[in-house]
Amino acid sequence: MATYTLSYILTTYNKLPYLKQVLERLIAARQEDEEIVVADGGSKDGTAEYLQSLYAAGQIQQFISERDKGEAHGFNKCMLMAQGEIIKLITDDDAFYYPAIREAANFMIKILRLML
């Protein structure tokens, strides 16, 4: 069985101001059975240091910061690291309505458990 119910996976590259806004809201919305996994494509704008501070504070559960081959490659890394039953892709410059995400995840988990 998975460690978490829901894994939010997020990629970023040199968008620290936007990333901070998205992660601030995501961290505030995250529940105990959810994790945040971030792949930074080797940003030069302080992103790695920011992610390290969030990780050290226990606000994100996993991250990697290394050069990659674009957003899809970063998402692939996150998917391999994710420990949740359900994965939700988050981008570093979009806004989300977390209650709707959670409702959809709960529906998918219910269906998944019925199938097992």
Image (cartoon, grey):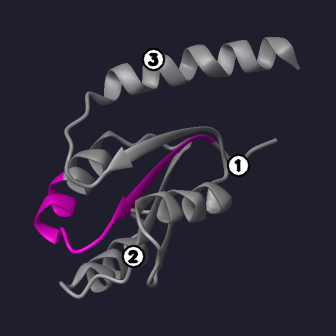
- How far, Cα to Cα, is label 3 from label 2? 30 Å
21 lies left or right of 73: left
Residue at the extreme left of the image, as rendered: 17
Q: Can I make out residue 61 in this image? A: no
Q: Quadrant of residue 55?
A: bottom left
Residue 70 sits above or below residue 50 on the image: above
Q: Position of residue 97 (x, y in %)?
A: 26, 27
Q: Do the numbered discs 1 and 3 sit on residues whose CB atoms are within 8 Å?
A: no
Q: Amino acid at mark 2?
A: Gly
Residue that numbered label 2 is attached to: 41
Q: Do the numbered discs 3 and 2 sit on residues whose CB atoms are within 8 Å?
A: no
Residue in the image at 70% along x and 49% along y: 3
Q: Amino acid at mark 3?
A: Glu
Q: Position of residue 70 (x, y in %)?
A: 42, 67
- How far, Cα to Cα, is label 1 from label 3? 19 Å
Q: Can I make out residue 18 in this image? A: yes
Q: Amino acid at mark 1?
A: Thr
Residue in the image at 36% along x and 83% along y: 42
Residue 24 sits above or below residue 7 on the image: below
Residue that numbered label 1 is attached to: 3
* Element assignment for label 3: helix
Magenta span of residues:
5-21
| Label 1 vs label 2, nearer the camera | 2
Q: Is residue 10 magenta?
A: yes
Residue in the image at 82% along x and 41% along y: 1
Residue that numbered label 3 is attached to: 103
Residue in the image at 34% along x and 23% along y: 99
Residue 38: which numbered mark, if any?
none
Between discs 3 and 2, the one toward the N terminus: 2
